[in-house]
Image (cartoon, rainbow, N blue to C red):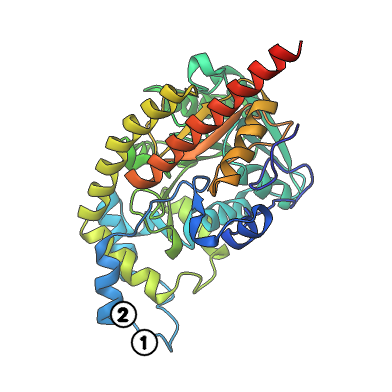
Amino acid sequence: MSPTPVTFGLPTQPASYSWEATDQEVAARFGIPIGDILRFDLNTSPAPPEIVADILASGAFETPLSEYPPSDYRRLVETAAGVYGVETDELLVGAGADEILDLIGKAFVPPGGRAVVPAPTYAMYRVITEQRGATTVIVPRLGAGEGYRLDLGATRRAAADADVVWLCSPNNPTGLPEPAGAIASLLDDIAADAEVAGRRAPIVVLDEAYAEFVGSSLLELRRRHDNLVVVRTASKAYALAGLRVGFAIASSATIARIAPYRPPGSVSTISMTVVTEALKDPRGMVANVARVDAERERLSDGLRDAGWSVGPTVTNFLLVDLEGPDRAAATATGLLLRGLVPRTFEGGHPLAHCLRLTIRDQAGNDRLIAAAREIEADRADRAREDGDAR
């Protein structure tokens, strides 16, 4: 049995990325009222911060909605630079982290080039690489028992003739950061290898979309590695995924190489205004992280009690190991029939035996725990029936 095709898997052809099914599509496919659909597949938050309603009610946008936003997003850039402790010329704004990744691909991944992707990780790294007509060099991560951490030696060797190295910490979809010092050591080794070979070091992209959940960042490494680009976002901890705002942070020289590929107005006036205010007043983000912290343990315990193996995580999602692709597929179908949408992985994916599940609010998480209990009870009943039939 293959996983129910509701969410994307790794592409097999260039530019073959498949977007997640919409709520309307899930409702139609499984005969469920659309109001009963609850997304556990998108790593988002259940509600935006209160500041959004206040700004929308006031209508106090930086420019009228009939006009284009300022092409330099100046207030947003200045505010974000202050929050991240960088200079304004070290930061570039995009329409979500995904546009930032795309701009990096346009700037640094040439047709016929090579990009290193430690897998499993975020599928967009491979998509962007292949859209550029380049080769993706897959480097398997270490196993679950070692937290799916980078194979530093293999990644270093693959980087020797690469244009870009895509890294993610904490890693999506496995949920854990790299061990302390690992990425710094890898950057040092890559730089040393490039110097010996007499070539420019590859661009190393460090996706820190989930950094706020661990309260730490490797932004400081940009000071001694001008090939490092750190990616941040307002989508996850700030609970503003629908506004689509992300940031590239790097040395000013590296930002200058990305900037020509940035469209002048991909971030809307509403998005720019709301995210600026959310960054200035981080109380909504702090409250959301605290909620996730509390619910992470409760949801994990509830799913374990139901009979599921839940891996360690520091993020706003869980990786559940269901022992095999067949059980994972059957479990995904059981969840979908109850209106709960999991992140599945296709048959050839190294995590085909797993589901990824977003940590939502208490009511939503309770629905998931109850569903897990029902699915496992049904599975036990079928196992008994099969035993009796023999």
The percent position of residue 183, horizontal first and vertical second, equals: 45, 28
Residue to which mark 1 is pinned? 64
The percent position of residue 21, horizontal first and vertical second, equals: 63, 55
Q: Secondary structure at mark 1?
A: loop
Identify residue type, mark 2.
Answer: Phe
**Quarter of the image with the C terminus in it:** top right
Real-space Cα separation, disc 1 to disc 2, in angstroms: 6 Å
> Can residue 226 be seen at all in this image of the molecule?
yes
The percent position of residue 7, horizontal first and vertical second, equals: 63, 47
- Residues under numbered marks 1 and 2 in contact, where contact means CB atoms less than 8 Å apart: yes
Q: How many marks?
A: 2
The percent position of residue 57, horizontal first and vertical second, equals: 27, 79
Identify residue type, mark 1.
Answer: Pro
Depth check: give the residue in front, 246 or 153. Answer: 246
Residue to which mark 2 is pinned? 61
Q: Local crowd at mark 2 within 10 Å, few (<14), some, or many (≥20)? A: some
